[in-house]
Image (cartoon, rainbow, N blue to C red):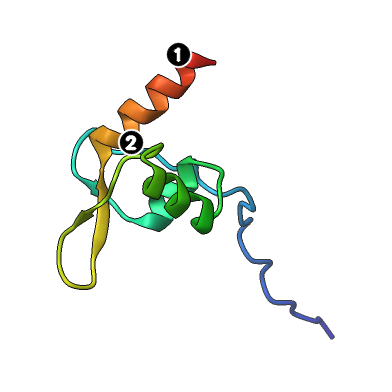
Amino acid sequence: MTTSFPKAPARVSLSTPVPTLPQTGFVRQAQVLSFIPISKSTLWRQVAVGAFPAPVKLTYRVTAWRAEDIRLWIENRSAAA
């Protein structure tokens, strides 16, 4: 009598893909926070005091940041460090 076992599932990578910031266009809050290691509250506090680029209101319910503004902010922070 032979016993048949189901095939083992393919290996699943546990690492998450590295996010990439687009050259142009808009990025939403979740995307911004994947590049900038701060909390949502800190992000909005920084926007309020002008330390982080202001977002653009695309529609009544959609707010996003220009990718160019985020890139420039990152470059300025890197240069200052």
User: Front-most of 4 and 73?
Assistant: 73
Asked whether the beta carbons under mark 1 and mark 2 sit within 8 Å of each other, the answer is no
Specify the amino acid type for callout 2. Answer: Ile
Please name the residue shown 45% across and 13% down the image: 79
Specify the amino acid type for callout 1. Answer: Ala
The residue at the far bottom in this view is 1
Please name the residue shown 61% across and 60% down the image: 10
Above or below for 44 versus 49: below
Residue 27, image x and y in percent?
A: 29, 50
Residue 14, image x and y in percent?
A: 64, 53
> The N terminus is located in which quarter?
bottom right
Above or below for 39 versus 78: below
The residue at the far left in this view is 59
Q: Please tell me how crowded label 2 is: few (under 14), some (14-19), or many (20+) other residues with Cα within 10 Å.
A: many
Above or below for 48 versus 78: below
Q: Please tell me how crowded label 1 is: few (under 14), some (14-19), or many (20+) other residues with Cα within 10 Å.
A: few
The residue at the far front in this view is 49
Above or below for 70 versus 14: above
User: Front-most of 48 and 71?
Assistant: 48
Mark 2 sits on what residue? 70
> The C terminus is located in which quarter?
top right
Q: Secondary structure at mark 1?
A: helix
Image label count: 2
User: Front-most of 5 and 45?
Assistant: 45
Residue 30, image x and y in percent?
A: 42, 57
Mark 1 sits on what residue? 79
Cα distance between the residues tagged 1 and 2: 14 Å
**Looking at the image, is mark 1 or mark 2 earlier in the sequence?**
2
